[in-house]
Image: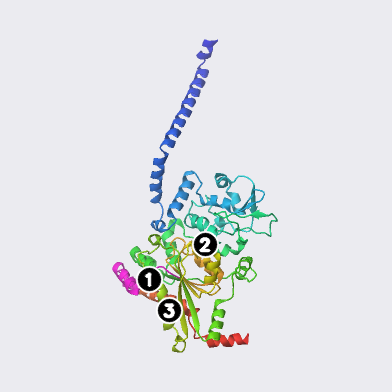
Amino acid sequence: MYRMIHSDPKHFRLSTKNTKKVYFLIGVRIICILYLSLYPFLDINTLKGTKKKVDPSYWNVYHSVEQLASKLEVWEHKNLKNFPICRLERVCKTDKGQWILPKWLNNYHFWLEKCGLNQSLVWYADIQDPIHLHNSSFQGDLIGTQVLRWQLPHLIADTIWILLWRHFIYYSENTKSWSFTCVSSASRPCITTLFWSALEPVLLNYQRPKEEDWTSQYLQQVLLSTIPTQWKTISPESQGCFRSVTFSRLRPAHIPKHVLSQEDIFFLENGILREDRLKSSFQNAKDTGKCMITIALKNNSVGYSSNRLNSFHENLFEQVANLIPRLALESTTETYRQDINIRLVDFHTNDLDDWISAKEKLQAVDVVVTDHSIANSQFLLLRPNTTVIEVLPFSYSAVMFKELALSLGLDYHSVSSNPDEETFLDCLFRYEQDQHSLSQLVQAYRQEAENWHRGIYQQTLHLDDLETTDKQMHRK
């Protein structure tokens, strides 16, 4: 019987296949062991390879290392402990141990499981799905594909966390009746609750640059909006000239009423005044006979200048601040110049928990000159029509605080470098040979620079309309 079994050709073939299968599995295990042993070296090589794939300006930002780690975690399916979505597990937890999460994350169970969130989940629907906001074709991972690669890491890792002082969560008490405890990264309790719907225009309503055409999208968003269409045909070096001399103003848009409403729970419960700054300033000028303009110099990023866009302009912050008083006097008639008192106030802060002090200072200012920082979430404390000038915005998130300023009714301006026409023209003539295109570019630059200069004082420092405003107030 024993010989008959082995003499069976069919059985012999089966035995050979089983042996090959065993050897194959052993080989796979050996390969896995070797891979794990060499993993640190492979990780370094992957890091170098990834760096070549992203846009060069990507490495100018403060969070580039963290973002790169997030990308690798998505691409390699590695340890996700620093993956931004994992930070959402600290958003809110009920007294019954249930996690409160936005409903759009329901489509990403795989990532939630990687983050250790696979049970006791409660969903709420008062958030718009950012994945499908502009283009429904983005069905990939949360941050590793196309459009979202550039904006969402910063949005989740920093803005959503720090925009509301690390104390607020995006959960509507009107939809659920549970009692819950909100925990910040420092394990401090929430101050109050903010509706996510009140922040949708701030966080989501802007065009994100596409990966495949990142540079042109960036230039369209951040650089001069009035440049003729011919400028796209000029040399990349000439486009670089505009990178160093950039002005922008907030585009006209609808301001959601629920954001600026006096009854809004966020402003009401935290004692933030929503009185229009222009009306208040006019009343003070009328009562005292003087126009007191308080300008706050809000330098948030001392020590991080090397990571800033156009950081080679070391004195830009001070130059812009000193430019404002001169513009105020030059743009005001002789009649009112003697009545203008300008006070410069240094406002250096990296402590987002200093709520009371920050609120008192920023509620009293008329103009804020600030660099780009997550601390600009303090825009929430400014009165409507306060003038904000953002200096050196990050290239990859330059629109973000514009949208916040829009929703809060602020008079927003930004400048990426010193508005020096001589330096700008020297740069253009060095690279651009087409004189026709060059003349149009120069004209566009001068027009935009003039608009920027006028815009700084037109709502804040210009007093020619005081008498007209006085008559209008009396009519009311």
Left or right: residue 311 compared with residue 476? left
Q: As drawn, is 114 to the left or to the right of 312?
A: right
Disc on res. 352: 2
Give the extent of the magenta segment. Answer: 414-438
Identify which amino acid the numbered label 1 is placed on: Asn
Residue that lies at the very extreme toward the bottom in this rendered image: 335
**Front position among marks 2 and 3:** 2
Q: Is residue 426 magenta?
A: yes
Q: Is residue 451 above or below residue 212?
A: below
Based on the picture, tell me whether residue 331 belongs to the magenta stretch: no
Image point (48%, 76%), residue name? 294
Of callouts 2 and 3, the N-terminal one:
3
Quarter-of-image position of residue 215: bottom left
Q: Amino acid at mark 3?
A: Pro
- Indicate the position of residue 316 as horizontal and vertical percent values: 38, 69
Asked whether, in this view, residue 13 is left or right of residue 446, the answer is right
Count neighbours of disc 3 (C-alpha within 10 A) and say few if under 14, some if 14 to 19, many if 20 or more: many
Give the number of the disc on residue 418.
1
Name, please, the residue furthest toward the right. Answer: 177
Instruction: Kindly identify which numbered label has been placed on residue 460.
Output: none
